[in-house]
Image: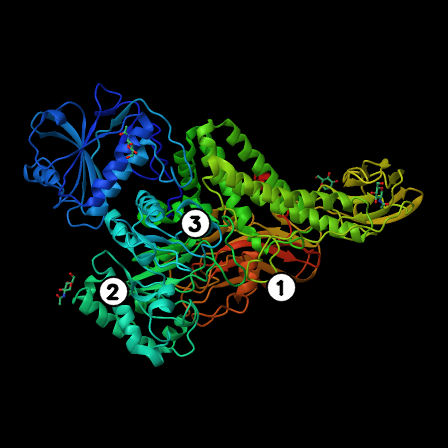
Amino acid sequence: MTRLIFIIVLCLISSAVGIGQEAIISFTSGALQLAGGKSITSLFLSSADFPGVLRAGQDLSGDFGRVTGNNLTVVTKDQTTTDTSSSSGPVIIAGTIGKSTLIDSLVSAGKLDVSSINGQWEAFQTQIVANPMAGLASALVIAGSDKRGTIYGIYDISEQIGVSPWYWFADVATTQQTNIYALDVHKVQASPSVKYRGIFLNDEQPALTNWVKEKYGGVGYVSGFYSRVFELLLRLRANYLWPTMWDSMFALDDVKNQPLADTYGIVMGTSHTEPLMRSTKEQSKYCTGAWDWSTNKANIITFLTEGAKRAEPYESLYSMGMRGSGDTASPTLNAAALEDVISEQQKILTSVVNNNLSLVPQLWCPYKEVGGYYQKGMTVPDDITILWPDDNVGNMQRLPIPSELGRSGGGGVYYHFDYVGDPRNYKWINTILPQKTWEQMHLTYARDARKIWIVNVGDLKPLELPISHFLDMAYDMTLFSSPDSTTSWLAQWATREFGSAVSTATASVMDRYGRFANRRKYELLDATIYSVVNYNEADTVLNEWETMVANAQKIYDSLPANAQPGFFELVLHPCKAGYILHQLYVNTAKNNLYAKQNRVSAAMYGANAVSAYAADSALATTYHKMLGGKWDHMMDQTHIGYTNWQQPASNSMPAQSYPAKSTTAAPGVFVDGGSATALPMMDPYGPATRWIDIYSKGNTTSTFTVTSDAWVTLTPSSGTLTPPGKTSDQRVLVSVDWASAPAGASNSKIGVNAGGSAFSISLPLRNTNVTAGFSGFVESDQTISIEPEHWSSATSSSDAEYGIIPGYGRSLSGVTLFPVTIATQTPPTSAKLTYNIFLFTPTTASITVHLATSMNTDHSRPLTYAISIDDAAPTTAQYVPIADLGTMPSNWKTAVENAGYSYTTKHAVTTGAHVLNLWAVEPGVVFQKIVVDLGGVRTSYLGPPESMRVGVGSLAIE
Ligand SMILES: *[C@@H]1O[C@H](CO)[C@@H](O)[C@H](O)[C@H]1NC(C)=O
Ligand SMILES: *[C@@H]1O[C@H](CO)[C@@H](O)[C@H](O)[C@H]1NC(C)=O
Ligand SMILES: *[C@@H]1O[C@H](CO)[C@@H](O)[C@H](O)[C@H]1NC(C)=O
Ligand SMILES: *[C@@H]1O[C@H](CO)[C@@H](O)[C@H](O)[C@H]1NC(C)=O
């Protein structure tokens, strides 16, 4: 089948980079030279155009200055006859159809055909026009279908000449260019995929608020701050903003805020809980009486009417409905009352804003308890966009079902990259897995929730990458149809921000970063998460972070000095910050365990943890002091020492323990898997080595020797245990020479003699081969662990097939059905995954399938998979219970904490070769891992590492 296109073409032309955008600029050659020629290029704007267009034109002029050293000469004129100032050099003409006299005269003279964009929402075209006016041979013309169409056309050039949307907010450096050329292309940029695309600044205390206080005179969220945000949003091709709300009043903190947003071209809204453009703080300050519809309706109507009147002159998107005060559930509202609230609000809009309500954009968000009213049958007027909320952790709770399609108001999404609440806040630094964002937004788009996409971005600053990704999808979802689109997007993002020389390495770092950080939110990490006993889990995880930081540091060191701050903020800082936290907790885990064992090395791990704790605040200080303190306070957020969902008042060092003082105690032993006397069984298909720790419990030096059968190799087989320090513990690696080991089952004894004490450790062996010719996964340690993309076969049907989302989940990738609009599947005949497995243990196997955190977006079609062994009838597993809208399924908390659901079914199995069959019954089921437990699965966070596959050639060592 070729329905899925797994190949993405990277458009990296001549190093002029706009993410995913058609290139119109080159630095080497082109039809019209815009920089590097004899004279400065002029930008012609019409004084009749929108002030926001004239303002963006000034930015383009300055952007040329950033790149070439020379600003464009901005010429505001309203006639197309020549004058001397305009004929002396190259010219860019930018303007809005129907508004710019320059564009309109080109159209009426037949020199510019705008028929493909005229009347469209936020569209533009860019092309070179010959003889646009007397005395001018050619000009680069940007024509927008409306105000923002023109603005996006202008910023398209800014981005392509090398000015990142994040040049100010993340200090992304511009590369100097001598020559800039416009290519001879006729670019037509259609309307964005999603009509309203924006961010919500929220939970802004302490970081953003402290920063704003310091930088903007201590008077709150003023226009100096917001103008930066408006510009950023427009450069990111967004158009919509929910302003900060906890202790601010956008329209009143600075009376310039609201008109300025409109001038820039930003559509203002308020959060879902702040109806008719009045902030929460205004509710308590200016609404007479209680915020209670049942007792104070008239005053609330008066209060809301003032909000509508205040917003009416400006482009506004009205949030409708109501919650209790302060973004909490109301004790008195119900479905009927909320219908009345909305009806009265629509009356206000009709009288104040427009008597044709279909021309007034409105949204209503079934958030938390409000969703419950909807479920109980509350009706919502058709012209209101239903803004479907996620579960606050990036999983859509609901999406439009067939009966909700075709509403004139359509559907939208309220999404989260930051949250305060259950199961735990996540608001320190970025923890977003971009592949997960893609999977949910791709589903959302396919399910026709396309009118509004807004994402809660906390303090904005540490979430630059996920914000870019989300808004790029919202702008043009056609570039994101492939399940591996995140891989190519990361490469394009890295190229834009840091240049093509480091883009592959940078994209690789951020691909890993998203996966590592998403395994468990930082706020939910502690010393008990990753196992220091089984599967070498904690060390493996820590090594992954260490390698990633080393890779990031190497890139950083290779960059010119002016590019380093941006790289630090976007890449190196989050990598280091996450690594330090993992150092803190892994060292604490070792300290705590080893102290119980009276190992003298416990003190060293405790000291390592103390250093990591200090490094955490030192890194925040580095962030705060860089660039002369530009981002002071941005890392003020506490993140260590959570005990419940709410953030702690300050960070606190996790408890360390220290062994009782002793100078004479004999050494001890501790082995892989957590016992002192037996190692896990070894066989030719498991890990090549196991370990034995021999450790000092005293302050004296002692020696040790280790012995076993000839086929058991022990490295080292002797050594010295020193007083406290790196070598007070010795790890002996155990491996087996299978060619000389006895066939079948046997048991080797390992003798340890340390400081005069003798220990005996048993090592069960099974030297049995799989049947010749078998290809697939082989049991070891009574376990088979499978990465779902390593299927033996994947069958498709006429309507569905499996695809791989690289980098999705906690380890390698996710496997799911495409397209996501298919009907419910019918095992066993529907598209199926099979895994050949070879078992040595006849038993009742528990097979645990690990799945994405995605939820039941259509309650009539709960997420379900089916599973069987060989020809047995499939067992179906509905792993996410149906929950009323606004409440969470019973297993939701565990699932979002662990970054995945898991579900276990039982299957009687015999020894030998078998086939594990797996079906996704609904689209949206994403497989992350499969673990067959034959009695040997050990405690860990990520589950057993993938088992060995035989007979699949080089694939086995992927
Ligand atoms: C270039 O443009 C920038 C941004 O608009 C402005 O701040 C700067 O003063 C301009 N430089 C000159 C030399 O006009
Ligand atoms: C309201 O506006 C819509 C959209 O422009 C239009 O189709 C409709 O005819 C208008 N209704 C009235 C009553 O004017
Ligand atoms: C070992 O000696 C060091 C240094 O004298 C001392 O700090 C530590 O407490 C001693 N540890 C034990 C377990 O006796
Ligand atoms: C397993 O297969 C290998 C390679 O064919 C062979 O060398 C070895 O002797 C076999 N082991 C047993 C126990 O049969």
Please state which of residues 73 and 350 is positioned toward the viewer in this rendering.
73
Dot 1 falls on a residue whose secondary structure is strand
Please state which of residues 223 and 92 is positioned toward the viewer in this rendering.
223
Please state which of residues 220 and 927 is positioned toward the viewer in this rendering.
220
Image location of residue 117, percent across then percent down? 17, 45
| 1 or 2: mark nearer the eye | 2
Specify whether 311 is left or right of 731: left
What's under tag 2, amino acid-wise? Ala
Mark-to-mark CA distance, 1 and 3: 61 Å
Mark-to-mark CA distance, 2 and 3: 29 Å
Image location of residue 785, percent across then percent down? 62, 52
Name the mark on residue 213.
Answer: 3
Residue pictured at 26% horizontal, 74% vertical: 343
Q: Which residue is mark 2?
A: 308
Q: Residues within 10 Å of mark 3 (few under 14, many from 20)?
A: some
Label 2–label 3 contact, CB within 8 A: no
Pick whichever of labels 2 and 3 is earlier in the sequence: 3
Q: Give the residue at the far right of this rendering.
A: 756
Pick whichever of labels 1 and 2 is earlier in the sequence: 2
Q: Which residue is mark 1?
A: 907
Dot 3 falls on a residue whose secondary structure is helix
Q: Residues within 10 Å of mark 2 (few under 14, many from 20)?
A: many
Name the mark on residue 131.
Answer: none
Label 1–label 3 contact, CB within 8 A: no
